[in-house]
Amino acid sequence: MHLSTAQLLEIVSAFPDSTLVFTEDGYCIAHLGDQETHSFSCSRLLTGRFVADVFCEEKAKWFMQQIRMSIFDQNLRVSEYSISPMDMRLPCSESSKLEREEWFEARILPLQSFIDGQRGVVWAARNINERYKLEQQLRFLSETDALTGAFNRRRFFESLANHFQTYHRHYLDCSLIMIDIDHFKAINDEHGHPCGDRILKQLYEVIKSQLRDVDLCSRMGGEEFAILLPHTKVNDAFVSAERIRKAVEQQLFSYQHGCLHVTVSIGVSSIESSDISRDSVLQRADDALYQAKKSGRNRSCQHRHLMKV
């Protein structure tokens, strides 16, 4: 017993996921499936159109790259991608159901036969919105300090390792700032640990307000924070450290029974060509931090050029 072409088409059309057929010039000949109830169907918008007619230039270029790379490699290609209202080029009346960013997984397989003289691919798209949101949530929990909302040690060391490799490959500067709250144990002993927790949370907000979007601030444990500043030389990192120190000094920290003034000591270092591991970068920052505390606290020190302010 063999299935007829009509029966095969009926079976494929019943699939919950979208199955599209693209020619190598980005024209969507048809789509099958897509029986799940979604508020937005990209497949129906694409059918009978070129990707460049549906999407903005950047997104259309990405679609074309996936199609052509699949044809060139002659292998199954799996990619995750998002589509947002900003990606759409069609009139609002056609794409109005797309209210937010939607995530998909594409399984792209090159066809062995030609379509009107062109090579083509089958593009099976599955909506992975719920899975993506869960993965993002799990990732956030795995790399975030639960008390302050800063990144945790795991994320810090992962980022430091990446910047360390980048520096030795491309010589892109990266500096490190270590921050420690002065007399934090005395604060906990005198005012209680809930007060200490509130200060840690507020301190992170003060630090964050002085950083760029590309900078990464992590709580290393206890009262210590570390900051990675990509594309930043050590002298510029020292200027940033001083800006943070002064902002903390001027901040009035509130807790259940009143307010406190808090100060921090800061050590600054940067990745250098002589470093053979990330540990040496951390050690220099720790040494500078120790020097800041030894010199009277509430100050920033820069390794090699220990500067007292």
Image: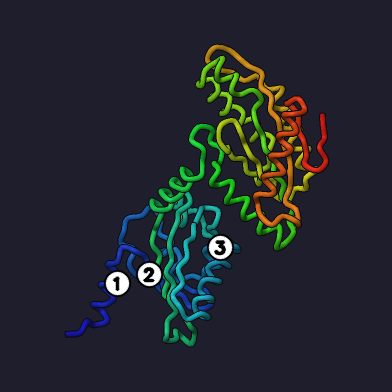
The three-letter amino acid code for the residue at tag 2 is Thr
Q: Check contact, mark 1 vs mark 2: CB within 8 A.
A: yes
Q: Horizontal and vertical percent for residue 176?
A: 69, 44
Can you say whether 274 is above or below 152 in the image? below
Mark 3, residue position? 59
Q: In this view of the protein, which residue sits in the foreground, 192 or 171?
A: 192
Q: Whole-Å distance between the Cαs marked 1 and 3?
A: 27 Å
Q: Residue at x 41, y 75 (%)?
A: 122
Q: Residue at x 40, y 59 (%)?
A: 41
Q: Quadrant of the C terminus?
A: top right
For residue 12, which numbered disc appears in the image? 1
- Asked if one can make out residue 278 in the rendered structure from this viewpoint, the answer is yes
Q: How crowded is mark 2: few (under 14 residues within 10 Å), some or many (20 or more)?
A: many
Q: Horizontal and vertical percent for residue 264?
A: 68, 28
The three-letter amino acid code for the residue at tag 1 is Val
For residue 19, which numbered disc appears in the image? 2
Q: Check contact, mark 1 vs mark 3: CB within 8 A.
A: no
The three-letter amino acid code for the residue at tag 3 is Lys
Most extreme residue toward the top is 257
Can you say whether 150 is above or below 111 in the image? above
Q: In this view of the protein, which residue sits in the foreground, 239 or 305?
A: 305
Q: Horizontal and vertical percent for residue 69?
A: 53, 75
